[in-house]
Image (cartoon, grey):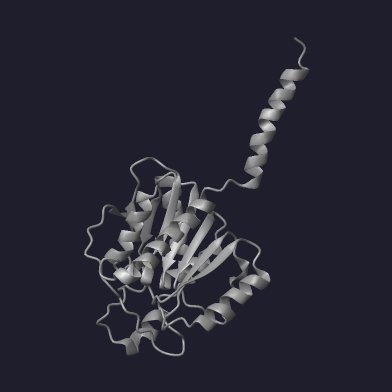
Amino acid sequence: MANESRPCLCDIGDRFDYESRGQEVQAEHIKAYVCKPPASTDKAVIVIHDIFGWQLPNTRYMADMLAAHGYIAICPDFYVGREAWKPSDDWSNFDDWLKTRDARKINKEADAVLKYLKEQCGAKKLGVVGFCWGGIAVRHLMMTYPELKAGVSLNGLIKDSDDISNLLNPAFFIFAEKDDFIPLRQVFTLLEQKLKKNCKVSYEVKIYPGQTHGCIHRRREDINPQDKPYIEGGRKDMINWLNKYINRREKNEEVWKFIVPYRRLCKTWITPG
């Protein structure tokens, strides 16, 4: 994505030469890419693509990486069959193209994906990650769907009108120091200050030094060895955030697990022998 004052000249970066391990499925009215871990699990993560769409090998690589860490990973086509942006497209048409692909108007698609995960995959513990355009979508979904227990937004554009203080569950925001499209002042004034003032759940804002837009999933560490620590570190941070909050037990669940054995103990103790 880009600074709203000028057109987005979003660089696709290093397009991965990668053969994905999952399969494409139909989730009601949209297609989706799904990759499952070797062992059965009830944990799942929705992976939201950037402007280059759900079939970009880089994004499927990230989904497969999540599956390798024990999650059912699903990357839906949130453009619902409409063409993704191509690097060869005329950037003067980008604003008109984007108007028909509003990252804050995806509830119908999110409902279909959540239903698929719950009914077809047995998923009970859910999270979401998104890149660029998908990073905006993550912020929206984390303020809309309480069943999403953790969110990671990577390089998502920030608008003055965004109210990100109503997060329902913990969210992690990743940015790059040298992002030409999201100036650091926007991160500090439009995001971090609002979170500090009003947010009532856990959050973290992290800026990776020396990095550019899309560094976590659009750059290959073998081609950019100087950036390898940040590329790998960002991916590790993303996984750690999901692990921490998706696997977290709810407080009422912890209390109930304590109360039930205690009641049984009391019953045994007061019953005449």
Give the image quarter of residue 134: bottom left
What residue is at 36 percent from the left and 74 percent from the top?
Answer: 51
Figure check: 5 above or below 32 = below
Residue 103: give x, y in percent of width and height. 45, 72
Residue 21: give x, y in percent of width and height. 26, 52
Q: How many marks?
A: 0
Figure check: 30 above or below 41 = below
What residue is at 41 percent from the left and 73 percent from the top?
Answer: 132
Figure check: 94 above or below 47 = below
Residue 102: give x, y in percent of width and height. 44, 75
Answer with left or right where residue 125 lies relative to residue 167: left
What residue is at 46 percent from the left and 86 percent from the top?
Answer: 4
Residue 216: give x, y in percent of width and height. 38, 67
> In this rendering, does residue 36 appear at all?
yes
What residue is at 45 percent from the left and 44 percent from the top?
Answer: 42
Quarter placement of the C terminus: top right
Q: 163 and 261: which one is in front?
A: 261
Give the image quarter of residue 48: bottom left
